[in-house]
Amino acid sequence: MDDLTDSQPQPSATLIDLATVRSSPAPEIVSFDRHELGQILRVYGRMVAAGEWRDYAIDTLKDRAVFSIFRRASEMPLFRIEKNPKLARRQGAFSVTAASGLVMKRGHELDLVLRVFDKSLKLIEE
């Protein structure tokens, strides 16, 4: 006899148990909480009123949250305020980074990190 007629029928697709797929937790993302976002938006509002900043973007990623600040929407961000929980025990979870990539301030407390904007900052154009 033929091998095809004697053998058991082979499944044409892989079976997946949906109960195990559905019960797996959704991937965690890092975001700013309400208090942190309020602190950031207070500084942002002050700088918008001064005519320094005009736009912002918020990115919530798997490993960090980023609040990017723009002079114009079509430009690269002037500053990035980042929350990276992996650095919380070492250097601090919060940082302010300039457009050049220079970390201007890093720390454990967001309000202390945001004080870098209390000084009058001037953008030096090349």
Image (cartoon, rainbow, N blue to C red):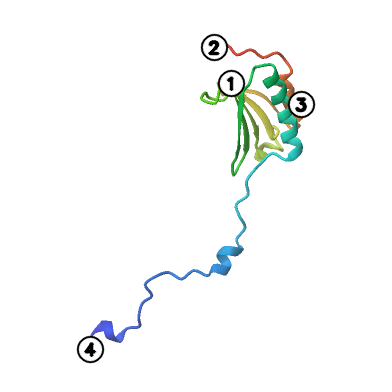
What residue lies at 61% left-to-right and 29% top-to-bottom? 56
Q: Secondary structure at mark 2?
A: loop
Relative to 1, is 33 above or below?
above
What residue lies at 67% left-to-right and 14% top-to-bottom? 121
Lower sequence index among marks 2 and 4 = 4
Q: Nearer the viewer, mark 4 or mark 3?
A: 3
Pointer 4 residue: 1
What separation in Å lies between label 1 and label 2 (alpha carbons)?
A: 13 Å
Please identify the residue farthest to the left as the structure is shown.
1
Lower sequence index among marks 1 and 4 = 4
At label 3, the amino acid type is Leu
Pointer 2 residue: 125
At label 1, the amino acid type is Arg
Mark 2 Cα shell of 10 Å, populated few (<14), some (14-19), many (≥20): few
Lower sequence index among marks 4 and 3 = 4
From the top left corner, tell me how far across and down residue 94 is, in percent.
69, 32
Pointer 3 residue: 112
Asked if residue 3 lies left or right of residue 105, the reply is: left
Lower sequence index among marks 3 and 1 = 1
Q: Nearer the viewer, mark 1 or mark 2?
A: 1
Q: Are marks 2 and 4 in contact (CB under 8 Å)?
A: no
At label 4, the amino acid type is Met
What separation in Å lies between label 2 and label 4 (alpha carbons)?
A: 84 Å
Q: What label does residue 71 carry, if any?
A: 1
